Image (tube, grey):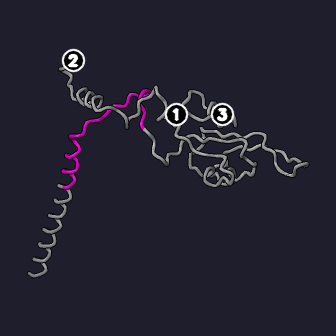
Amino acid sequence: MFPMLTGFISYGQQTISAARYIGQGFIFTLSHTNHLPITIHYPYEKSITSERFRGRIHFEFDKCTACEVCVRVCPIDLPLVDWRFEKDIKRKQLLNYSTDFGVCIFCGNCVEYCPTNCLSMTEEYELSTYDRHELNYNQIALSRLPISIMGDYTIQTIRNLPQSKIDEEKSWNSRTITDY
């Protein structure tokens, strides 16, 4: 009789804890029903990327020594470094540097391990194109610095979005089909 009684007690405790977890899940779900979505009107409004965001790679040709560390640390051997050995100065002379962003996984190893800091990550994330071959960037395309989102006067960042615009979005999203 005693083992059956302890079995009923443990079953009751498990049932109560399961009901508590289910109730916590419902409360959490219902707490998010009051949040209205905010629509971002891309490309006129852009979200500000985090400080550690890994966007397009920026390359400085003058700093590069053609050591090829970036190629060795890349998990897919992506950067292409063309160089020739200059006998009179007894060092490598960089001829061409290119990266295919259609294949790049943006791991940041090339930037992290570059001994001369000629590579850096930018906040540019707009690498969309209709032709995949346009994502092959040579040293000239890689050396172009993108316009900062914060400094571009044609773009309104989401952090600087006025409260009236957010209120307008909330009122727009709360309309129903019968309002039209």
Comparing 165 with 177, the one in front is 165
User: What amino acid type should be assigned to the residue bearing mark 2?
Assistant: Tyr
Sequence-earlier tag: 1 or 3: 1
- Which circle marks residue 117 in the picture? none
Range covered by the magenta-colored residues:
24-47
Judge the density around disc 3: few (<14), some (14-19), many (≥20) Cα neighbours within 10 Å: some
Q: Which residue is mark 1?
A: 126
- The secondary structure type at the circle numbered 3 is helix
Left or right of 148 in this view: 85: right
Q: Which residue is mark 2?
A: 180
Which of the 4 image quarters holds residue 19? bottom left
Relative height, residue 144 to residue 65 (above, below):
above
Of badges 2 and 1, nearer the viewer stands 1
User: What amino acid type should be assigned to the residue bearing mark 3?
Assistant: Ala
Residue at point 60% right, 53% down? Answer: 112
Residue at point 78% right, 43% down? Answer: 94
Sequence-earlier tag: 3 or 2: 3
Q: Which residue is mark 3?
A: 141
